[in-house]
Amino acid sequence: MTKAELVAAVADKAGLSKAQSQAALHAFVDCVTATLKDGEDVRLVGFGTFRSISRAAGPARNPRTGETVQRPATKTARFQIGEALKGALNS
């Protein structure tokens, strides 16, 4: 599902216009991004949890050349699925 398809589906289910749905999706993404940037988790009970993860600097291998290079410390996001979503996917 693309972003445009998601906007259309949310608009249809919620009875909103596509513009309202797109604004809501952008607001959601902006809020999640800001919260993760501050180092906090975003917990959506039944759906899942977005977590900010710090990865330490260290050696990495370039798969194309096999050369070992230094990887800088970075932050990334992880998603842990919630029980209700997991149950819905496996039923």
Image: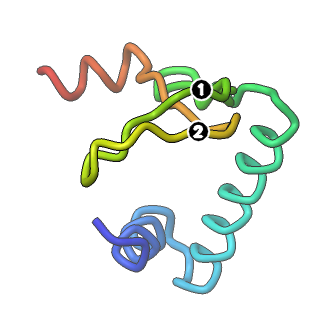
Quarter containing the N terminus: bottom left
The residue pinned by badge 2 equals 71
The residue pinned by badge 1 equals 58
| Residue 55 horizontal side relative to residue 31, left or right | left
Secondary-structure class at tag 2: strand
Q: Position of residue 90 (x, y in %)?
A: 14, 21
Q: Residues within 10 Å of mark 1 (few under 14, many from 20)?
A: few
Residue depicted at 71% across the width and 46% down the height: 32
Circle 2: residue type: Arg
The foreground one among 57 and 1 is 57
For residue 69, say whether it is visible: yes
Q: Position of residue 12 (x, y in %)?
A: 40, 72
The foreground one among 60 and 17 is 60
Circle 1: residue type: Gly
Residue depicted at 29% across the width and 20% down the height: 86
Residue depicted at 66% across the width and 57% down the height: 29
Residue depicted at 75% across the width and 59% down the height: 30
Q: Earlier in the sequence, mark 2 or mark 1?
A: 1
Secondary-structure class at tag 1: strand
CB within 8 Å, label 2 to label 1: yes
